[in-house]
Amino acid sequence: MKVLKVLLWIVGIILLIGVILLVAAPTKMHIERSVAINAPASQIWPHLVNYASFNDWNPWYKMDTAAQYTITGQDGTVGAASNWKGEKIGEGRLETTAMEPYTSVQQQLTFIKPWESTADCYYRLSENAGVTTVTWGFDSEFPRPQNIMGLFMKGSLEKDYDNGLQDLKKQVEQ
């Protein structure tokens, strides 16, 4: 009987923690990371807008090098998209929705598997005396109960963005 009481208490505490996380976890996620690159914006631009170049510094490409990628539309223009499907990274699509040359790129990220969701991604470039600050951002909404997953993903995504930007910096400055 004592064992049953202890198990019920444990289950009750776990359920209570789950309910608290469900209510307390934010339903919106914003990530923004930046890096200063010793190059003009015009030299960095092709690495951001051309999906064929994106995998050279894309942090998720390294996680699943066997993933299949297809580019649709004219790469480097509004409407172009990169579609992927892989064992480790799932399935999704990244489409360029707007761009202002050497200043900003807006993209829509659509995850298909392992779960469906969308996000807005962007790059912003700011050049000063031959040094360009590249800011990579991500905005998404996670409805309940997915908001609990978003709570735990943020730190991992920030690390991925930092690693990707560092690889971009190395590639451009070589």
Image (tube, grey):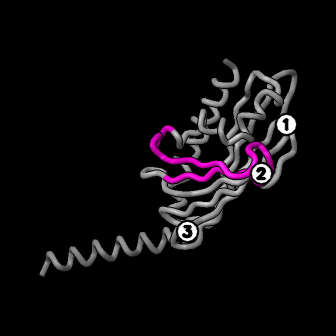
Instruction: Please give the label number shown on residue 106.
Output: 2
Question: Residue 75 lies in magenta, yes or no?
Answer: yes
Amino acid type of the residue tagged 3 in the rendering:
Ala
Q: Residue at 70% of width from left, 37% of height from top?
A: 34
Picture coordinates of residue 112, whole percent (x, y)? 55, 63
Picture coordinates of residue 23, whole percent (x, y)? 54, 73
86 with respect to 112 (left or right): left
Q: Which residue is mark 1?
A: 102
Crowdedness of circle 3 by 10 Å Cα count: few (<14), some, many (20+)? few
Crowdedness of circle 1 by 10 Å Cα count: few (<14), some, many (20+)? many
Q: Residue at 55% of width from left, 73% of height from top?
A: 144
Question: Foreground residue, 44 or 166?
Answer: 44
Q: Residue at 69% of width from left, 46% of height from top?
A: 32
Picture coordinates of residue 118, whole percent (x, y)? 64, 63
Furthest-top residue in view?
A: 174
Q: Which residue is mark 3?
A: 24
How far apart, in angstroms, are the residues tagged by discs 1 and 3? 39 Å
Question: Foreground residue, 124 or 53?
Answer: 53
Mark 3 element type: helix
* Pointer 1 or 3: first along the chain: 3
Amino acid type of the residue tagged 1 in the rendering:
Tyr
